[in-house]
Amino acid sequence: QVQVVESGGDLVQPGGSLRLSCAASGSISSINAMGWYRQAPGAERELVAAITSGGTTNYADSVKGRFTISRDAAKNTVYLQMNSLKLEDTAVYYCYADIVYYNYRRRSWGQGTQVTVSS
C-alpha cells in the first residue's frame, strides 16, 4: 500500500504566498513523476505542475512565473511554492505520485488540500 499525504493548504490574501507539501510512503521501489492538479468548484481537474525523476518540470500557463515545483527524492516529497496568488487559484489541490514497486506501477493520489485566496 502507498499513502500520499498533502499539507499546507490555507486561506491567504491575493498577492500572498503558500507552500504545499506532499509526501509518499509505503510500498515504493522508486517514484517517476510527481505533481499537482487542482479542481475549483464547478470546474474540471487541471494539471498545475509536474516534475520527473530527472528534474524536468512542466507548468500550466496560468501559473508560470508564479509557482515553482521542487522535489526531495530522498524523502519521496514534492513541494509547490505558490507566489503572487490570485483569486482564481482557489481550489482543492491534489498531489500524485507515479509509484514503481518491483513490476507494479500505478498513480497514487492524495486526499487534497484546500487553498483559498480571498480578501
Image: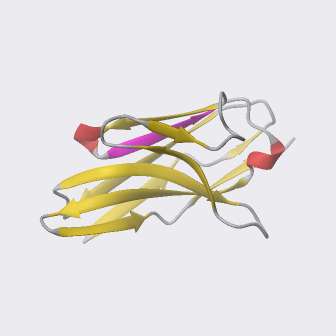
Q: Residue at x 38, y 66 (%)?
A: 108
Q: Quadrant of residue 73?
A: top left
Does 94 appear above or below 87?
below
* Residue that appears at 14% across and 68% down: 103
The image shows residue 19 at horizontal and vertical percentages of 55, 37
Range shown magenta: 77-82
Q: Determine whether, in the image, residue 96 is placed left or right of residue 30.
A: right
Q: Quadrant of residue 4?
A: bottom left
The outermost residue toward the left is 102
In the image, taking residue 70 as reference, residue 42 lies left or right, namely right
Residue sitting at x 87%, y 41%: 119
Characterize the magenta stretch by its predominant secondary structure.
strand
Q: Is 13 contained in the magenta span?
A: no
Horizontal side of residue 31 vs 10, given as left or right = left
Residue 75: x, y in percent?
A: 27, 42
Percent of width and height locating residue 104: 20, 70
